[in-house]
């Protein structure tokens, strides 16, 4: 059986997302990310990217600017992973340095074929 693909949406509390780490903290974080990426290289399909702060919400009858920075929680990035099942996808993300921060949550959704 082949692996399933999962979209992972990185969410962060807006209030805590503004703190910038020190250069030494950045080095430590980078080393953790490199180790995680190496360990789960077979699962990481696309590391994704950081999402911009501007966008739009499109409905059948309207278009509104958004998302708004005043929101309590902001989707800041995404990634795609491959795993045998949801539990395996959760294990990959739980091992990630991304979830070490109490201000971060990651939503995992299976990508279904049409």
Image (cartoon, rainbow, N blue to C red):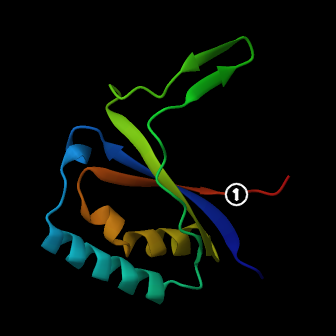
Q: Is residue 46 above or below residue 18?
A: below
Residue occupying image coordinates x 18% and y 49%: 19
Q: Is residue 9 visible?
A: no
Q: Residues within 10 Å of mark 1 (few under 14, many from 20)?
A: few
Quarter residue 58 falls in? top right
Horizontal relation, residue 72 to residue 65: left or right? left
Q: Residue furthest right?
A: 114
- Number of numbered discs: 1
- Residue 102 appears at what percent x and percent y? 23, 54
Residue occupying image coordinates x 47% and y 42%: 52
Residue occupying image coordinates x 72% and y 11%: 61
- Residue 2 appears at what percent x and percent y? 76, 80
Quarter residue 109 falls in? bottom right
- Residue 60 appears at what percent x and percent y? 75, 17
Residue under label 1, please give it: 111
Q: Residue furthest top?
A: 61
Horizontal relation, residue 40 to residue 94: left or right? right
- Residue 12 appears at what percent x and percent y? 33, 46
Residue occupying image coordinates x 58% and y 26%: 56
Screen quadrant of the N terminus: bottom right
Q: Secondary structure at mark 1?
A: loop
Q: Is residue 28 visible?
A: yes
Q: Residue furthest front?
A: 23
Horizontal relation, residue 18 to residue 66: left or right? left
């Amino acid at each position: 059986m082949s692996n399933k693909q999962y979209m992972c949406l990185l969410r962060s509390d807006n209030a805590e997302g503004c703190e910038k780490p020190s250069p030494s903290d950045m080095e430590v974080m980078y080393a953790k990310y490199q180790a995680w990426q190496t360990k789960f290289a077979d699962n990481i399909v696309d590391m994704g990217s950081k999402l911009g702060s501007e966008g739009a919400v499109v409905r059948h009858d309207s278009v509104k600017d958004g998302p708004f920075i005043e929101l309590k929680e902001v989707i800041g990035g995404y990634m795609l992973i491959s795993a045998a099942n949801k539990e395996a996808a959760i294990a990959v993300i739980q091992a990630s340095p991304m979830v070490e921060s109490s201000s971060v949550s990651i939503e995992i959704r299976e990508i279904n074929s049409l």
